[in-house]
């Protein structure tokens, strides 16, 4: 059987237990130009979104681009700045994400909610080392109804979306959930105390 140290899979390079964006896909992002109509703006966002699981807080970082095609089309200076910043980030920050072992180690999710959306990161700690490493990122802007949720509901939504997105890693095993929301932490503790 042929053994490889490096391979390409779904637009990423997999090497030595980590995955990172394919340099050819990164070059395609660097070559993007600002759009002149709504369809081009949506296509531009699609190109940027392709590697969103490598980018923390992707939804909030690209919000000014998505706003350009919500009602008609209007390219703004904020959107242009966002595009240039995403190019710089792609060119200078090569993110490597850990590929976890499903038989060993421990998983955790870290979630947060703001006024405009949610963010989460899936983390993995190998049994041999005591350091959590990122596996994937998730971010999402709120729709109009979700903007009306209270803070606790927004934080719980972040946890729900993260667990659903990464269910293939989390379901059937114990994992940690880190959140800065004291009510969510308290609710977890009350449930645990009542079950003992």
Image (cartoon, grey):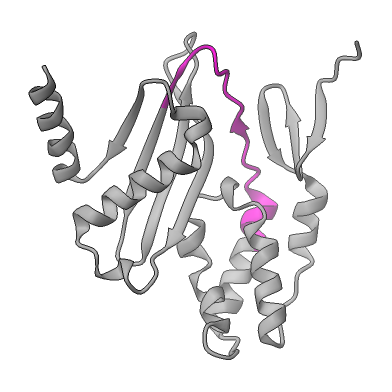
Residue 118 image position (x, y, % from top left)? 38, 55
Count the labels in the image: 0
* Image position, residue 116 (x, y; %): 36, 67
Q: Residue 168's spot in the image, x, y percent?
A: 53, 31
Residue with the most extreme right position: 2
Q: From the viewer's perspective, is 45 left or right of 29?
A: left
The answer to which image quadrant residue 41 occupies is: bottom right
Q: Residue at x 20, y 53 (%)?
A: 152
To which quarter of the image does residue 95 belong?
top right
Say which of 157 and 91 sits in front.
157
Q: Is residue 115 magenta?
A: no
Q: Quadrant of the N terminus?
A: top right
Image quarter where the C terminus lies is: top left
Q: Give how far across and how far down residue 61 sits, in percent.
A: 50, 63
- Residue at 75% across / 53% down in the picture? 26
Q: Is 89 within the magenta?
A: yes
Magenta residues (range):
87-107
- Residue at position x 72%, y 87% in the image: 36
Can you say whether 25 is above or below 163 in the image? Answer: below
Q: Is residue 35 above or below residue 143?
A: below
Q: Quadrant of residue 188?
A: top left
Q: Residue at x 67, y 65 (%)?
A: 46
Left or right of 187 in this view: 90: right
């Amino acid at each position: 059987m042929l053994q490889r140290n490096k391979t390409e899979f779904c637009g990423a390079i997999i090497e030595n237990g980590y995955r990172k964006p394919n340099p050819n896909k990164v070059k395609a992002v660097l070559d993007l130009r600002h759009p002149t109509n709504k369809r081009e703006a949506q296509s531009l966002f699609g190109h940027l979104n392709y590697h969103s699981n490598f980018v923390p807080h992707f939804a909030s970082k690209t919000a000014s681009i998505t706003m350009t095609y919500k009602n008609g089309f209007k390219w703004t200076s904020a959107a242009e700045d966002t595009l240039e910043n995403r190019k710089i980030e792609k060119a200078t920050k090569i993110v490597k994400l850990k590929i976890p072992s499903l038989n060993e180690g421990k998983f955790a999710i870290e979630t947060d909610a703001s006024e405009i959306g949610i963010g989460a990161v899936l983390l993995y700690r190998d049994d041999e080392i005591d350091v959590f490493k990122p596996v994937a990122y998730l971010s999402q802007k709120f729709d109009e109804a979700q903007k009306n949720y209270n803070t606790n509901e927004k934080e719980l939504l972040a946890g729900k979306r993260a667990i659903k997105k990464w269910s293939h890693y989390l379901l059937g095993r114990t994992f940690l959930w880190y959140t800065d929301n004291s009510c969510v932490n308290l609710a977890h503790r009350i449930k645990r105390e009542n079950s003992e």
